[in-house]
Image (tube, rainbow, N blue to C red):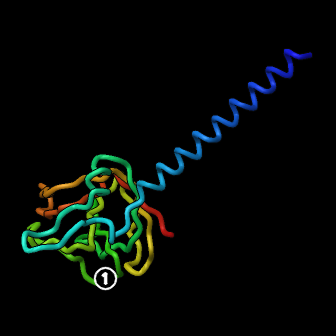
Amino acid sequence: MPALCFDRRRMLAMLGATAMSFQAGQTSAADNTIAFGQLYASFGVLGLTFSDKVKELSGKAVSMRGFMAPPLKAEANFFVLTEIPLSLCPFCSSDADWPDDIVVIYLDRAQTFEQANGLIEVRGRLEVGSWTDPESGFVSLLRIVEAGFHRV
């Protein structure tokens, strides 16, 4: 009988450790949520400076909430996530004109676009730095790639 108690205690200890590691994983995922106010550390004459959080999460899975700006064309594989609902796409000609309240989202698969006034949550991998899309010519400083989204 004592061996059975020992095995039960060991089992309970293992379950407790598993639950704690699961909670730690959930905390880590929550830390990978970015808000628009957390994107940049400063706005100066030399342009925008990325925040430490953005630098730390570069290349990692993140989630972000915002609004889908109207796409440039119906068959685009990307859209612009904005802090507030917009009626026009904030297309930029260069990263020097980059607004501080948008992030480009590149989808992992085709999805139906949402109304511009509907709050959505995007999940994907964060890319940081100037990049020009070879197909559209769209220039971005921040992108969430391999992304999917759902209405909140």
Residue that appears at 39% across and 72% down: 66
Q: Quadrant of residue 141?
A: bottom left
The residue at which mark 1 appears reads as 86
**Residue 3, horizontal then vertical, whole percent:** 85, 15
**Residue 50, horizontal then vertical, whole percent:** 22, 61
**Residue 90, horizontal then vertical, whole percent:** 21, 76
**Residue closest to the eye, 118 or 112:** 118
Q: Quadrant of residue 96?
A: bottom left
Residue sticking out furthest to the bottom:
87
Q: Quadrant of the N terminus?
A: top right
Q: Quadrant of residue 140?
A: bottom left
Near mark 1 (Cα within 10 A), the count class, few <14, some 14-19 or many ≥20, is some
Q: Can see residue 75?
A: no
**Residue 104, horizontal then vertical, whole percent:** 26, 63
| Kind of residue at badge 1 | Leu
Residue that appears at 38% across and 54% down: 62
